[in-house]
Image: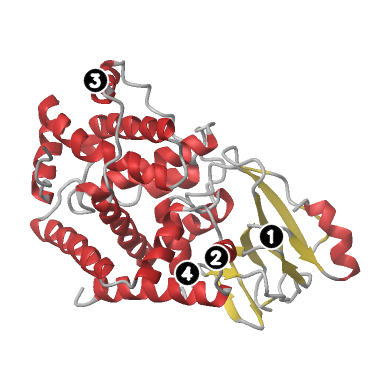
Amino acid sequence: MSAPAPSADDMKLWLNAVAAKQDRAAFGRLFHYFAPRIASLMERSGLNAAEAEEISQETMVAVWRKAALYDPAQAGVSTWVFTIARNMRIDLARKASRASAGLAALGELPMRLEASVEDMALANERDARVRRAMATLSPEQATVLRLSFFAEKPHAEIARELSLPLGTVKSRTRLAMAKIRALLERDL
Amino acid sequence: MINHHPSDFNLARLAGGTLDAGPRLVVATHLSGCPQCRTRLGSFEAAGGAMLDEAAPAQLSLDAFRQTLTRLDDADPPAEPQPRVLHPDLPPPLNAYEIGPWRGFRRGFQWRRLRLPESPGANVIMLKVAAGQPVPHHGHSGTEYTQVLTGSYSDALGRFSAGDCVELDEDVDHQPVVDPDSECVCLTALEGKLRLSGWIGRLIQPLIGI
C-alpha cells in the first residue's frame, strides 16, 4: 500500500508546482506525506487526536498559501514544514494569535529570493548531516533531545520524569546537542 | 563582541516551540543580533525536520484531505497587519510590544514591565541600573534569562555586555554590579518567581510584581 518515501528533490518539485501553478495533484502528494506525520508529532507533544489533525490541516493550508515563500537555500522542505507546524501549535496554545512579535521576528530570519546553487547544496548538506548526527545519538541522548523538543518542560521537570539527577539530564542534553553540532559544523 | 550565548538546550526548545513566551522573547532578541546563534537555531530546526520525516504517520480522519482542499478555496485571510513599531530604539523582537513606564524609587535602579498579549502571565521586564550600581542580591525559583541591551555588568560568573545572553538556573544566587563606565539596560524573563534577598529586596518585590 504505502508508497516509497519521496526524496528531498521530489518534495521541492511538488512545492514548486504548488507555488507556480497551484497544482492540486502536487499538493495532494505533499499532504499525504506530511499531514499524517505532522499529526503524529503533535500527538507526541501532548495534543489529542482531533487537535493534532486540526494543526496538520492548518499547516497544510499554510503550505499551500506560502509555497512561493519557501527558500531552498535556507532549509529542506521537511524543515520548513516543521517550522510552520511548530508556529501553528504555538498559535493554538495562546489562542489570541495577534501580536506575535517575538515569533514573527523568528519567522523573518533573512530570506533571500535568489538562492544560488551553492546555497542549496549547503542547505541539502546540512539536512543530511543532521540526519547522520541524529543516527549516532545514544538512546538516552535521543530521549532528552525529544523531550526538549516536544515537552514544555524545563530541565528540572525532565529530570524528575526520567528519575535522573538534574546534572545528568543537563549533561546528556549538552552531549546530544554537541554531537549534532560537531557533525554539522565540521568543514562548514 | 558577543561572549555569552543561549544554551543548546534552550535553542532546541525554541526550535521545537516549547520555550515559554517570556524566555522565547529574550532568546529571540539575542538571535536578532547574533548570526552565529541563528545558524545554530537552523541546525535544531533541521533536526525537527528530520524528526518529522521519521515520525510514524498518524491515522487521519477519512475526509481529512477533502476538508483541507475545501479550506484552500476559502478566501485568503487578510494579510496579518505588520506589528506597529512602538519603540524604534529597541531590537526588532521587542519593538512592537507595549512596555509600561519606567518605575523606581531611586534613580539608580528602574524597571519597566512588558505586556505579552500572547502570554499575559509572563514575567518579562527591562531593568535599567546606573553605572557602578548593584542590582539587589537575588535568587530564582526558576531559570532567569537575561539579554544585555546596553552597557555591561559583572558578577561572580563573569562580565556581561551588550549582546550577551545569560541563563541562570534556580540554584544560582547572584549580585550583579553594573560596570562603572555607563548605565546598563537588560531584558529579563523568569520561568519561576524571583526571590529578592534583604530588606530592600523584600520591599520592592511586590512593586516589580514578579
Q: Which of the chains bears the disc numbered 3?
A: B
Specify whether residue A111 is in view.
no
Residue B43 spot, x, y in % from top left: 31, 62
Q: Which of the chains bears the disc numbered 4?
A: B
- The mark lying in front, picked from 2 and 1, is 2
Image quadrant occupied by the C terminus of chain A: bottom left
Image quadrant occupied by the N terminus of chain A: top left
What residue did someone put label 2 on? Answer: A155
Lower sequence index among marks 1 and 4? 4
What residue did someone put label 3 on? Answer: B66
Which amino acid lies under the numbered mark 4 shown in the image of this protein? Ser
Q: Secondary structure at mark 3?
A: helix
Q: Are labels 4 and 2 on one chain?
A: no
Q: Residue at image x 69%, y 60%?
A: B127
Q: Residue at image x 62%, y 82%?
A: B157
Q: Nearer the viewer, residue A89 or B35?
A: A89
Q: Is residue B199 left or right of residue B34?
A: right
Which amino acid lies under the numbered mark 1 shown in the image of this protein? Leu
Q: Secondary structure at mark 2?
A: helix
Q: Residues within 10 Å of mark 2 (few under 14, many from 20)?
A: many
Q: Which mark is residue B127?
A: 1
Q: Is residue B88 left or right of residue B135?
A: left
| Label 3, label 1: how far apart the Cα atoms are | 52 Å
Which amino acid lies under the numbered mark 3 shown in the image of this protein? Arg
- The mark lying in front, picked from 4 and 3, is 3
The quarter of the displayed image where residue A128 is located = bottom left
Q: Which of the chains bears the disc numbered 2?
A: A
Q: Are labels 2 and 3 on one chain?
A: no
What residue did someone put label 4 on? Answer: B7
Q: Are labels 1 and 4 on one chain?
A: yes
